[in-house]
Amino acid sequence: MTTVSAKPTIDEQVEILMSGADYGDPQIKETMTRELRERLIEAERAGRPLRIYCGYDPRTTDLHLGHTITMRKLRQFQELGHDVTFLIGSFTSLIGDPSDVDKARAQLTPEQVEINAQTYAEQAFKILDRARTRVRYNAEWLAPLTFKDLIEFASHFTVQQFLQRDNFKKRLEAGEPIWLHETFYSLMQAYDAVAQETDVQVGGQDQLFNIVVAGRQLMERLGMKPQVAIIMGELLPGTDGEIKMSKSLGNHIPIMSTPEDMFGKIMSLPDKAMPIYHKLLLGYSPPQLAAFNAALADGSLHPRDAKMNLARQIVTIFHGPEGAARGEEHFRTVFQRGELPDMPDHPVNGEQRVVDLMADLNMVRSKGEARRLIDQGGVRLNGAKVGDAEATVRLAPGADAVLQVGKRKFVRLVGGK
């Protein structure tokens, strides 16, 4: 985490805030850098902070480590004294961002969104300064819009602009449907910037169109100064080490996962993911990263030790030193010594389906997920794979069996009377 003791000069602020930004086009980066410097100068003269925001759609109940990349950029703005808004996309999430998917997202109900959003702010405060963070919900200004408003906003864009987006272009070429409501997402996100009179919006590479094209263009057409876009250049890969971390792909590490689960998932990362995790999550500078890579290359640092240190540091950020120690002990017990960890007991009376037990014990989010895990060989009973989604458990009184889901979830089933 960057700590600022004395306020840097304008040029120093620009260097800090543009670090890690990449637009895939040097000219765009040059424009954004120049405009950021101009905004900082104007704000300093006016004696006001810049207004910054980044939006997070509550499509599921948890944020993940990939989200912390943009949060750390927001934290840099906070430490430089600027006004930061953590925006919860309570309205945009009803549609879902089409930016990083090759098919339409399932639409959520307002009730589902409300449930998912309940802990978003608390999760964000693991990175952001609670006292200096404004939390808002975009239903505040998007819900009251009329159809007339939508027509006006849409009149500032062409269909061709939307069809040039990579994901839409690929779907069009493949003959896959592009639903009209998906194009509304960019309009709504653009209006987020208008409603908040934003100076700067932060986002990932998948938000390039929404922020740089839609957001800036709508603001300009409505007579406002277009926002500066800070697009983070690198995306954190998921647990597969290849594809960007994503809740929808299931390769994510939730911020609110247990210390044991978080530690274990980090240790399961492929070795090749170590440099980018150290860079994006621990903030390694270029010299630090060069030294780290050199140590891995010459063998003076073993990948396992690097990964163990990474896991300790990341789990400490979210769960403190005690949580990191707990996670490490669990990992060593289960995966290095082959012992079973401490686990809760659960009584089993009569015959029960394994799928039902997994759902009732919150070891999975749904029975559908339980069936998928069984089909994939990810569920064991007393060490043996459960091979049938309709498998049942019946235990004699006092007898027990260990139910294991994935690598890190254990429950001891105990036969009732």
Image (tube, rainbow, N blue to C red):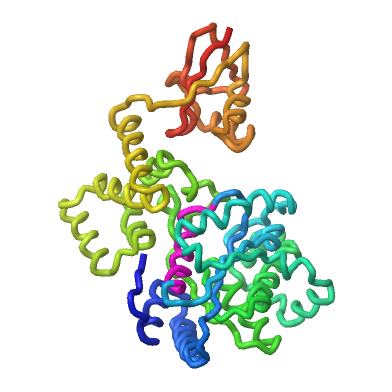
Q: Is residue 197 above or below residue 312?
A: below
What residue is rendered at 56% in x and 81% in y? 199
Residue 32 position (above or below residue 182): below
Q: Quadrant of residue 407?
A: top left
Quadrant holding the N terminus: bottom left
Give the side of residue 65 with respect to residue 305, left or right.
Answer: right
* Residue 375 vs residue 285, the one in the foreground: 285
Name the quadrant containing residue 152. bottom right
Task: Decide which of 183, 133 is in the foreground and name it.
Answer: 133
Q: At x 63% / y 36%, what residue is drawn?
A: 366
Which residue ends up furthest to the front in the rendered image? 131
* 79 in relation to 103, above or below: below
- Closer to the camera in the image, 206 or 147: 147
Residue 368, percent from left and from top:
63, 34
Is residue 87 on the magenta stretch?
A: no
Residue found at x 23% / y 69%: 287
In this view of the protein, can residue 176 be seen by the observer?
A: no
Percent x, y for residue 289?
26, 64
Residue 41 screen position, x and y as percent: 46, 91
Question: What is the x, y in percent for residue 138?
Answer: 68, 66
* Quarter occupied by the C terminus: top right
Residue visible at 52% across and 69% down? 203
- Please provide the residue range marked out in magenta: 63-78
Relative to residue 408, is residue 304 depicted above or below? below
Asked if residue 201 can be seen in this view, the reply is: yes
Q: Is residue 69 magenta?
A: yes
